[in-house]
Image (spheres, grey):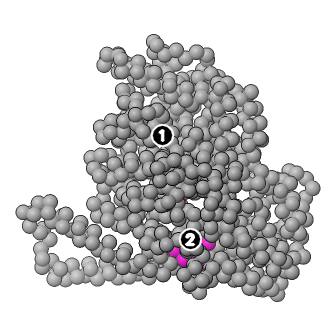
Amino acid sequence: MSDPALHPCFLGPYAENDALLEQLVTEFLRDHVYWRRNIHPEDPPAIPTRARHRADFQAFEARLRRELHLLSAALKRSVPFHSQRYLGHMVSDLLIPGLVAQILTLPYNPNNVSEEAAPVTLDMEREAGMQLAAMLGYGVDARRLPCAFGHLTSGGTTANFQALRLALALKCYPLALRAARLDGIDLAGDDLDAFLMPVDRSIEVICAAQRLLSAMSPRERQQAGRRIEEARVEQMGLAAFLDAHPALSTPLVLAPATAHYSWSKGMKLLGLGRRQLVQLPEAGMRICAEAADELIDRLERERRPVLLAVGILGSTEFGTIDPIDRLCDARDRSAGRGFGFGVHVDAAWGGYLMSLLRDEQGGLRGIDAVGREFARFPRPEVYRAMSAVSRSDSVTIDPHKLGYLPYGAGAFLCRDRRPVELLAEAADYVFDEAGSGEPGSGYSAIGRYEIEGSNPGAMAAAVCVTHRVMPLDAAHFGRIQAATIRGAEAFRDLLADWVPRMAPRFRVVVPFEPDCNLLCIALNPVGNEDLAACNGFMRRLQARLAVDPAMPRPEQSFYGSSTTLRGDALGGEAMRALLQALGIAAPADGEELAALRLKVLRHTLMNPFLLDEVNGINYLARYLAYLEVLLPELLETHAGR
Ligand SMILES: *Cc1c(COP(=O)(O)O)cnc(C)c1O
């Protein structure tokens, strides 16, 4: 059933809600005009009424109109993300609440770098952070520890950088405290013990130091503060910091092969080096918990410092969900033995799926309640992983992905706001430990902690208003997420009939079962046993499904995307079984299998109107019917050459 709750949310594939959008945009543009006129109504118009009769005004307007027409015409070559025929990348239609809130705010142009430049939208950014934190199950009551903290970023990439930056600051700070030799801070053990300290313990140490500093006289405090500052990695640089502490080595970041390349970027940017990005072993496109435990135990035995273990909630290419619960278990186990690292959940894609796990009171819904409206979602291990996100140390979520908002909106969240002060450019040595979040307290000035400088208050308004109109629970925002999962399940069911129908000419395999709303298909022409030829065929197929920026074809029937399956992410034996099912000769050697790359179709089933019951159209069935014609055609044109 297409969900009537979704009908007012989007402009719509046919721009069905054009009147609503137009009314709102015009109404609030007018409102902005009145606001300008009423600030000091006694000030007369500065631009004379007759200005527009001048020739140069008219020439300007003519140039402006011409350029806008050209732009508007050129934009017709855009990819129709809003269409039910678009199954490609992680983007779809935009939510009207966010779109209108952003357009409404743009002419006010608030800058969320500081309270002074954004009296309204900075509060909204704080609120958006807390709305997202509550969806994850983080504590959001400032009177209780730990209380979460969150802010918006330009996207998931920057949010992941922020996770690295915070983890590094937190890991290195106890060493600066040791070096500063404050009386009353007792850090038993050596430098390496301090560097391996569990996250929660580091936070306690930092707070103890804050208490000590705040009890000092202003002069003493300033001197001690300076000594700490001089010994911080942020002041010394990583090279000098490690030189000063020869027992330490550059900490590792553990992430699976399915991780987004922003992690590699982040390692370069922070000077940690890509070599320190260590692959967490995978099987079936998800972190293999047992093998990850083994790796972590080995690193612990070797006393190799680890900054973060990254688990993914909805991988970019495959939508797979890592066992976050098991990563948190491993962290807690190691922490009990004094070997600390944080768990970061990269939920840039899947973060908003968490709304399905929240009831309207903010409670966690049980697996049966969540699963009631789906055929298979959530598999028990997926539910366990999602309900464990509240135990992680930090999370990345992209409102510009499954939040259906315009680009430029990511978010960084952390479970405990206390260490965030370490990110401030000018450290404040006395801060409110409870972090009340009231205006005036340290945590309210979000801009002090962000990577970005100036950043759009209009985006904060868009995110916050959207979450207010559609709260992040199963009964509201979850309706959209549910539609995407029903779409994926319907697609999976259609494939059960389609695969045997294609069998005379193509072998079709679903290489791994979907965890949420992304679904991959591997296929190979019958008779072909060569992997390179199969990949070549898939590339030609992808060329037909992708948008050609040089020559877009408005008559294009469907838009898709493709990706590459890696043997080391799928697992050697699973790769062998997959190749066999496709009829491709598989190498006997395990290492060769791990190194294999297989091109597959990747479908992002994000459009909430894929199953159009109003008109009795199933766009996914139409897509498969389209492939049924396209595939043999591609094979023949190639054979004929
Ligand atoms: C998209 C994505 C990112 C990067 O986010 P941007 O908003 O593109 O910067 C990081 N991680 C995952 C899992 C993603 O899906």
Q: Which of marks 2 and 1 is in front?
A: 1
Q: In the drawing, does residue 148 fall left or right of residue 39?
A: right
The image shows residue 531 at horizontal and vertical percentages of 84, 67
For label 2, count other residues whose C-alpha is less than 10 Å away and answer few (under 14), some (14-19) or many (20+).
many
Give the farthest residue toward the right.
588
Mark 2 within 8 Å of ligand 1, using the beta carbon: no
Looking at the picture, how far across and down is residue 625, in whole percent? 71, 83
Q: Is mark 2 on a helix, strand or loop?
A: loop
Evaluate if marks 2 and 1 touch, with contact meaning CB atoms under 8 Å apart.
no
Q: In which quarter of the image is the N terminus?
A: bottom right
Task: Assess whether residue 87 is covered by the magenta stretch.
Answer: yes
Q: In this view, does 249 lie above or below 370?
A: above
Q: Quadrant of residue 607?
A: bottom right
Residue denoted by label 2:
607
At a point 58% along the width and 79% down the height, the residue shown is 613
Task: Tell me which residue sits at (52%, 32%) in the image.
Answer: 170
Q: In this view, does 246 lie to the left or right of 521?
A: left
Residue 281 image offset from top left, x and y in percent: 75, 45
**Which of 52 and 479 lies nearest the eye of the viewer?**
479
Which residue in the structure is indicated by mark 1?
Answer: 139
Q: Please state which amino acid type lies under the numbered disc 1.
A: Gly
Q: What element carries label 1?
A: loop
Numbered range of the magenta stretch: 81-88
